[in-house]
Image (tube, rainbow, N blue to C red):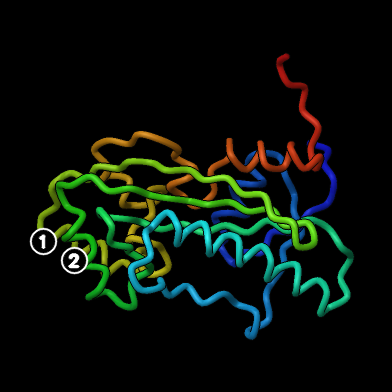
Amino acid sequence: MPHAPFYLASASPRRLELLRQAGFEPSLLRLAAGRVVDETPLPGEPPLVYVKRLAHQKALAGVAELAATGLAAAPVLGADTTVALGAEIFGKPADADEAVAMLSRLSGREHQVLTAVALAEGQRVDLRISVSRVRFAHLDAAQVRAYAASGEPLDKAGAYGIQGRAGCFVERLEGSYSGVMGLPLFETADLLAQAGIVNWKRDA
């Protein structure tokens, strides 16, 4: 798909894979250690506010990286995904034990997966949000321990990847499958179209 240049400020291979699946080929932008965004939630911060804040900050961190390294200017796409059980934010587990604890909490319950996508051009940032509802089947302790031991949950919000083995845990999904993976393609494509990065014929 022909499109204007843009950067992806993310270390997530899933986000790059999803963009390529949709026909986009961004330049990958690795942030220097000093510009990596701290993902610690603020005290009392609601999940929606949290995920929007991080996506916004990641996009602007990408702009700062361009300025610091002298790379050619172009819009920067940043994104963040979190899992929320009520008002509680589930980030990436620190180890297998924390993954077991998270998955045990999600077992047999519905949770939300929130992904915010932000596009920064200079200091101007446009943002889209995707909110999906996911219900897990009841998981027995052996299932949870085996999945945690696989290592798959360790780099994923909420300790699971719907595109991997944990897809078998999902009893129901309402929302965006790609959003649960980490980059909602509908919202991302709309963001890129509104910025003129891709030109699509729209219905009047």
- Identify residue for label 2: 145
What kind of residue is marked 1?
A: Ala
Give x and y (percent) for residue 140: 10, 55
Q: Type of residue at label 2?
A: Arg
For the C terminus, give its image quadrant: top right
Compared with residue 3, is residue 160 higher up or lower down, i.e. above or below? below
Q: Residue at x 54, y 49 (%)?
A: 183
Q: Residues within 10 Å of mark 1 (few under 14, many from 20)?
A: few
Q: Is residue 77 left or right of residue 162?
A: right
Q: Which residue corresponds to the image point at 28% horizontal and 57% vertical from the top-left?
A: 87
Q: Position of residue 99 (x, y in %)?
A: 26, 68
Q: Are marks 2 and 1 in contact (CB under 8 Å)?
A: yes
Q: In the current view of this chain or complex, which residue is farthest to the front?
A: 44
Q: Nearer the viewer, residue 144 or 72?
A: 72
Q: Residue at x 38, y 69 (%)?
A: 92
Residue receiving disc 1: 141
Measure the C-alpha gap from mark 2 to mark 1: 6 Å
